Image (cartoon, rainbow, N blue to C red):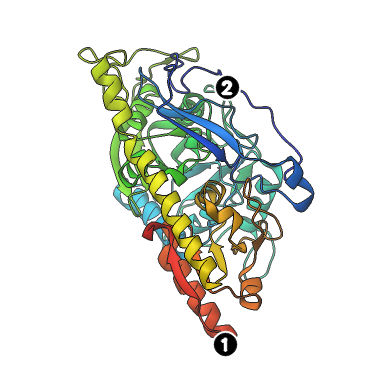
Amino acid sequence: MKSARMGTEKFRGHCLMCKAPLPKEPVLSFSGMPASAQDIPSAEELASDSGMDLSLYVCGSCGLCQFDCEPVPYYREVIRAVGLSETMKELRRRDYRHMIEDYGLSGGKFIECGCGRGEFLKVLKEFPVRIFGIEADELSAGIAFSSLNVCETCGSLGPRSFDDREPIPQNIGICDIKNVFPEHGDEELFGAPFDCFLSFNFLEHQPDPVSMLSCMYKNLRPGGYGLITVPALEYILEKGSYYEFIRDHIANYDRGSLEKLLRICGFEILEMELIGIGDTLRAVVRKPETDSRLVENGSVQRDTQRGGIGCRDSANDWASAEKHENIFSKFENISNNQKNIGYNINKFVDKLSKEGKKLALWGAGHQGFTIASTTALSGYASFFIDSAAFKQGRFAPASHIPIVSPEHFAEHRTDVVMITAPGYIREIREAIEELCREKGIEAPEITDILSL
């Protein structure tokens, strides 16, 4: 686990977005959940690691779906295990190309809020823009600066280079990364004003999303843009995929609540769509030429426009029986599917046990951790397989299943592998098959969590 921690705080019992009191009754309650997705215990830390209970609420004022708990201690930091996967790199290229070509941002200044170790900014180096990044973790910020500015040909630090076919804007030089977190809405960032800010699956970790986005707003030029992605609550509700919930994601945005938040912070919403397998909500926003924010001295002014799934309006209030019933009905699919998944996994594990077959799980991410800690997998799976080196040699939180490398799997092959990362099933399946071909071993039976 990480040793250095920043302070965390949350105004318990109140909404993360609008600070209104939360309803007394949660829409869902979970037990035995992982305490975090990234604090992955070592052997010495297993005795102090256990599952936790989580309650999910929907704000009756703004409609934001959220956990009423303290945020994870590292919520300011970005930790990416899949930042360099081919699937993700291609997705980022499409994002950058769209912003640069469709909004005329060639040669502009881009800043990523929560840039981690520069994984996504490294892809941005392929494009003719000037690059900035902020990252709360000092080590990650240093790694990002070094990796983005080292010449891949000679190994020395220096200005980045472009494809010879692209014109090189005069103001583009070294990529500038700072160990900063946008703690306050009125904070001035180095290099501002910017032409575009980027935020990739970072907003859902924030216990104070208004301050973070207000800071981005302040440091954009008038008419500047933003590109934001968050996990989509719509996907979780439709699929009933309870395993997408994790304490790290203290806020769970649907289209309505994300629109509400962006309007509160003054942005015009230009685009809003579901991408990937429908599990990610993507928004393109613009800072208008004149200030239209609904934030004043850190407090949110009332906005009666569309909100999230529990949003109060003049005709239908959270307190009404009809509204109350409607909100709870939206989460029935999740409760039902959790029971079905548990039942099906019990049957699956029982079948494997009777056949004497060993099982491994591939994908030591938050979905896999949640599934393992809340089903019979915790007592049966031999290990998790994951290509992220920092996870290997540790144990899945709550379930305490060992995490190993793909090479370990090749030497200690199991009969069956279950893929527990829904967004990467095809890619992982191909990786398993390729690994087995390289090692000259028989491929295992492969299944995935979506099949259950």
Q: Which residue is mark 1?
A: 440
In the image: residue 369, left or right of residue 242: right
Q: Quadrant of residue 313?
A: top left
Residue 412 position in % (x across, y down): 65, 75
Horizontal side of 76 relative to 4 (left or right) equals left
Task: List the residue tagged with mark 2.
Answer: 10
Camera-side residue of 220 and 430: 430
Give, as a three-letter code, the residue at label 1.
Gly
**Residue 147 percent coordinates (x, y):** 64, 58
What percent of the width, then of the height, locates residue 381? Answer: 58, 61
The quarter of the displayed image where residue 224 is located: top left
Give the mark, 2 or 1, whose residue is nearer the N terminus. Answer: 2
Vertical relation: 430 (above or below) 147: below
| Identity, as a three-letter code, of the amino acid under mark 2 | Lys
What element does badge 2 sit on?
loop
Q: Position of residue 418 (x, y in %)?
A: 49, 64
Q: Nearer the viewer, mark 2 or mark 1?
A: 1
Crowd band around label 2 with a 10 angstrom C-alpha radius: few (<14), some (14–19), many (20+): some
Residue shown at 57%/22% (left/top)?
10
Tell which residue pokes out farthest to the front in this image. Answer: 354
Residue 103 position (above or below residue 17): below
Label 2, label 1: how many angstroms apart (C-alpha)?
53 Å
Disc 1 element: loop
